[in-house]
Amino acid sequence: MSVTSTSFRSGSLLAGGHTPLGETKAQVLLEKNGQKVIFKTFRQGEVMPTHDAPMDVLVTVLAGRLIITVDGTPTEVEAGDYVIIPAGAPHALSCREPARILIYR
């Protein structure tokens, strides 16, 4: 079977065969109808300061271990875990060990 669409893309985020992220450390995998799927990497000790989003956000941990704080409540997550952050909720991230996550917003 052949694929004729020029927008077809594939890759591996788990096996390490993904496109190197370089200094940006984030890659938008899909953007459609105002929603995005974003792949991000973090080094041990990195943080994402407190911020919020106007929509619900789904964070899925592909590798590593992080602490995600939502509304002042920290939750430790690791590979295979996910967190749904309600719209408008202040949230932050602290990386315990090198991590890869997917964000859907």
Image (cartoon, rainbow, N blue to C red):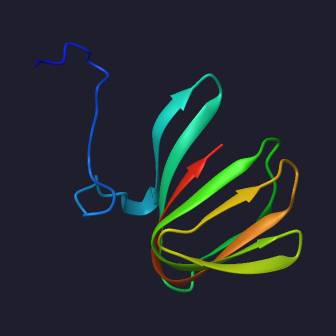
* Residue found at the very far top of the displayed protein: 4
Total residue callouts: 0
Depicted 67 relative to depicted 53: above or below: below
The residue at the point 61 percent across, 58 percent down is 59
* In the foreground, 18 or 15: 15
Residue in view at x 30 percent, y 58 percent: 20
Across and down, in percent, residue 74 comes to 77, 80
In screen coordinates, is 13 left or right of 34?
left
Q: Quadrant of the N terminus?
A: top left
Compared to residue 33, the image places residue 55 above or below, namely below
Residue 99 vs residue 14: left or right?
right
Residue 48 in picture, x, y percent from top left: 67, 69
Residue 64, image x and y in percent? Answer: 46, 78
Q: In the picture, residue 17 is in which quadrant?
A: bottom left
Please name the residue shown 55% across and 60% down the image: 60
Q: Locate residue 22, reporting x and y percent.
A: 36, 60
Q: Is residue 58 left or right of residue 43?
A: right
Q: Dividing the image into 4 quarters, which one contains the C terminus? A: top right
Q: Nearer the viewer, residue 23 or 102?
A: 102
